[in-house]
Amino acid sequence: MVLDVREAVECAFNHIPNAIFIPLGELEDPLNELNVDDEIYAVCRTGNRSDLASQKINVKMFY
């Protein structure tokens, strides 16, 4: 599963097919919807938000 933690404006220009889009600032609420036992790759533009997201839900980072 690819978890896109970029902002909506960034995703509008470059959508990742089949990715789940949850901006980092909204990640706390939908954690119940994610199965952390799945292989999840957090994606953002530079890696900073991916790092924060991976720490929040303990997933692999992908820049």
Image (cartoon, rainbow, N blue to C red):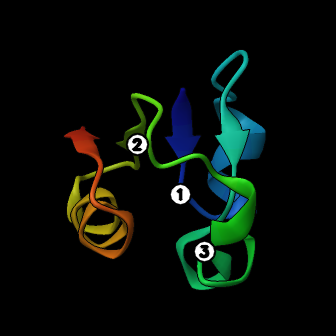
- Going from N to C along the chain, the mark reached first, 2 or 3, is 3
Instruction: Examine the rendered structure and indicate whether residue 63 appears above or below residue 49.
Output: above
- Asked if marks 2 and 3 touch (Cβ < 8 Å), the reply is no
Query: Which residue bears the numbered disc 2?
Result: 43
Disc 1 to disc 2: CB gap under 8 Å: yes
Q: Amino acid at mark 2?
A: Val
Q: The residue tagged with tag 3: helix, strand or loop?
A: loop
Q: Can you give x and y, in whole percent of width and height, for residue 34 in the image? A: 64, 52
Of pointers 3 and 1, the one earlier in the residue sequence: 1
Residue at mark 1 = 5
Report how far apart the C-alphas of labels 3 and 1 lie in the structure: 8 Å
What residue do we see at 54% from left, 42% from top? 3
The reply to whether discs 3 and 1 touch (Cβ–Cβ < 8 Å) is yes
Q: What amino acid type is highlighted by mark number 3? A: Leu
Residue 59 % position (x, y): 29, 49
Give the structural element (helix, strand or loop) at label 1. loop
Q: Amino acid at mark 1?
A: Val
The residue indicated by pointer 3 is 27
Q: Quadrant of residue 56?
A: bottom left
Q: Position of residue 55 (x, y in %)?
A: 24, 70
Q: Is residue 47 left or right of residue 21?
A: left
State which quadrant residue 26 falls in. bottom right
- Given residues 12 and 18, the one toward you in this image is 18
Separation of residues labelled 2 and 3 (CA atoms): 13 Å
- Is residue 16 depicted above or below 49 in this figure? above
Mark 3 or 1: in front is 3
- Which residue is found at the position 22% from the left and 54% from the top? 47
Q: In the shown orientation, is residue 28 left or right of residue 56?
A: right
The numbered mark, 1 or 2, whose residue comes first in the sequence reads 1
Q: Residue at 53% across / 73% down in the picture?
A: 24
How dense is the environment of label 3, judged by Cα within 10 Å: few (below 14), some, or many (20 and up)? Answer: some
